[in-house]
Amino acid sequence: MHRSGVVMAWNVFKFCTILRGFGSIMILLVLAVVGVTYYAVVITNYGPALYDGDFGSLTAFFVLLLFHFLLVMLLWSYFSVVLTNPGSVPVNWKPVLDEEIGEAELLNVSEYNGDVTNQGIRFCRKCNQPKPPRCHHCSVCGRCVLKMDHHCVWVVNCVGAMNYKYFLLFLLYTFLETSLVALSLLPQFLAFFDEEEIVGTPTMLATTFLAFVLNLAFALSVLGFLIMHITLVASNTTTIEAYEKKTAPRWRYDLGRKRNFEQVFGTDKRYWFIPSYSEEDLRRIPALQGVEYPSKSDFEAQEV
């Protein structure tokens, strides 16, 4: 029995190591899908249509304009999730007295040399330090993450307090972009089933077909994730908490839809739909998790 437990633990560790190694592959896969889509929409279909000189030119102009705008926002959001620290616990962080952190693994004096009068202090035995409220340890990244939502293989990073907004914007702009591509390539896709001869080289036709299928599949799948995360934001719940929390009349972190939204997207409306925060919100969001960074540079200095 003991031997079985050891094998299982080793397999979990090996699985986490494999996930960590997927990093560059997943980024390249995302860029490959973007490349195929760009070739099908811009090079093969709507780019040449700009020179038709009729109503089709105007349609192509607006399709390409919206396509490039959404593509820029998608890539900006994507690499913001990839490159942004999701929220690290500062070295030697200590919880404040009477901090409400709910169910916890209690510490004894030998485990924690700070104030142990608060019997709700949580402790990460892997990082060997106390954990703030809603903080979880990621076995793939090998660190504790503030308000951890999940580890996403597609973005090669954890999704936590500081990049959850960027992740949601990535889902939003991915859904809008893939929906636009699927709709714009739908006439060309339907032409494959007509008896009339289709104009274009085999490579162009194959790329158009592939781009339509890929973008339609992504649009439908991302829509499900987007709806799920909108529901979680509305109740101020992470994916982990949605599976872990007990059934209760009211979730203790639910502050109302407006304040729940502002905890993720910030209070400055100018920044709501771009992957960035105002200086005030950049300091405010970690503070909501019980962590204070003296300055913006101190936060950015934490290991990504």
Image: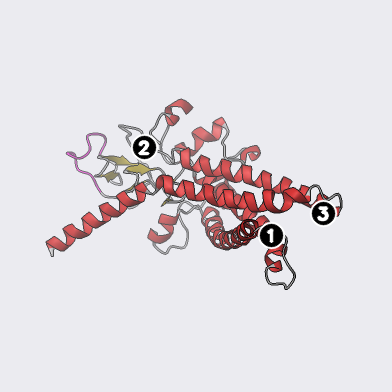
The residue carrying mark 1 is 185
Whether residue 174 is visible here, answered yes or no, is: yes
Q: Residues within 10 Å of mark 3 (few under 14, many from 20)?
A: few
Query: Tag 2 or tag 3, which sits nearer the N-term?
Result: 3
Whole-angstrom CA distance, mark 1 to mark 2, is: 46 Å
Q: Residue at x 65, y 47 (%)?
A: 70
Q: Nearer the viewer, mark 3 or mark 2?
A: 3
Q: Amino acid at mark 2?
A: Val
- Amino acid identity at mark 1: Leu
Label 2: which secondary element: loop
* Secondary structure mainly formed by the magenta segment: loop
- The Cα atoms of the two marked residues, 3 and 2, are separated by 55 Å
Q: Is residue 190 above or below residue 204?
A: below
Instruction: State the residue in front, 289 or 162.
Output: 162
Q: CA distance from mark 3 to mark 1?
A: 14 Å
Q: Is residue 145 magenta?
A: no
SS at badge 1: helix
| Residue 108 on the magenta span | yes
- Looking at the rendered structure, the kind of residue marked 3 is Gly
Give whichever of discs 3 and 1 has the lower sequence position.
Answer: 3
Whole-percent x and y of residue 49?
77, 51
Disc ID at residue 89 = 2
Q: Over which residues does the magenta segment extend?
A: 106-116
Quadrant of the drawing holding the C terminus: top left
Q: So how many labels did they put on this image? A: 3
First reached walking from the N terminus: tag 1 or tag 2:
2
Q: Quadrant of the N terminus?
A: bottom left
Do the residues under discs 3 and 1 have CB atoms within 8 angstroms? no
Residue bearing mark 3: 56
Q: Name the residue located 36 percent from the left edge and 33 percent from the top edge.
A: 90
